[in-house]
Amino acid sequence: MPIRIVQHTHGGPEVLDVVDVPRPTPGPGEVLVRAHAASLNPVDGKTRRGQGRDLPLPASVGWDFAGVVETLGDGVEIFSVGNRVYGMPSFPSEAGYGEYVVAPAEHWAPSPATLDDAAAAAVPLAALTALKAFREVADLQPGQRVLVHAAGGGVGHLAVQIAKILGAEVVATASAEKAAFVTELGADEVIDYRSTDFTEALADAKVDLVLDLIGHENGVRSVRVTKPGGLVIGVPSGTGGDLEAAAEAAGVRSAGVMVSPNGAALREIAGWIDAGQLVPTVSESYDIHDVQDAHRSLDTGRTLGKIVLTIP
């Protein structure tokens, strides 16, 4: 039988179990994908701990996949059996690491031709988050100055590149160990947050937009380096609490972003990848049976780029 990763309680990585499940059947408008790889995102760990998506137990976390179309539901004409696809199916509802994933056809897109399945699986949630923040929430314009926090992480390393594709000037915060990596991504300036206070470094060179991938007080501090009328986008903290109040007091806007499946955007993203403009980084790869070890690494919060599960 196919396998799937399931948890029956909230907690640490040890709650994740490999179980046998029936092979799903696609309904009308849906596609069944044989997954070859899945990638991890911070929301996976939060949901596992009971702090993220409110999924009824038993549950299965995981929303980034790449694989091959196995079966088409009635009415699906945009794919054929055997097509390589990637996507962020069903988010924020349950999808889950496993051999098979079924979801509406529009949640999927053809995989980038230049990537293998492991690298393709690293892209969807992170790239869609950054693109939605910049294009839909911020209406980012060429020449604007953008600050990306946690620029060496899963969303951050793609956000730097997408901001450059959209014509922005990019300032990034990252640890000294990741500074060279972030510079190679295209950042115009990298601030080592451990040795330098970014609010002092940018006091006389404020930005139009902040993408805060850290949250909590970091978003509030970011208001200080944002131009009047500029925007601070908080992921995952959004507009709640202190950020909203600090922004309003400073004449700065604040917003959150909730990513959603978007096959059309993934087609555009695949085009950037195949053109060499956007390069995902996979720093760690685990067999799906070693999912607990993968989540232990995820929980450190120190990963360069993305962590991927391969599914034999």
Image (tube, rainbow, N blue to C red):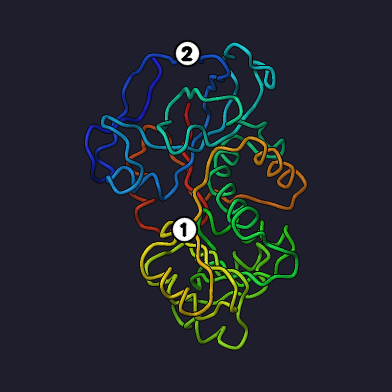
Q: Are marks 1 and 2 in contact (CB under 8 Å)?
A: no
> In the rendered image, which residue does mark 2 sit on?
25
Screen quadrant of the N terminus: top left
Q: Position of residue 200 (x, y in %)?
A: 51, 87
Q: Secondary structure at mark 1?
A: loop
Q: Quadrant of residue 162?
A: bottom right
Viewer-closest of 33 and 89: 89
Q: Quarter of the image holding residue 167?
A: bottom right
Is 288 above or below relative to 128? Answer: above
- Expressed as whole percent of the image width and height from the top left, the position of residue 85 reads 62, 29
Q: Which residue is mark 1?
A: 235
Image coordinates of residue 30 in percent, x first then y, are 55, 20
Whichever of callouts 1 and 2 sits on the residue coming sooner in the sequence is 2
Residue 301 percent coordinates (x, y): 39, 58
Specify the label residue 10 is tagged with.
none
**Residue lying at the far right of the rendered structure:** 275
User: Residue pushed farthest top?
Assistant: 74
Q: Disc 2 marks which amino acid?
A: Thr
Q: Residue at x 63, y 36 (%)?
A: 116
Tell me what residue is drawn at x 62 percent, y 58 percent. Answer: 134
The answer to whether residue 159 is left or right of residue 214 is right
Q: Nearer the viewer, mark 1 or mark 2?
A: 1
Instruction: Please state if 296 lies on the left or on the right of 271 as rendered.
Output: left
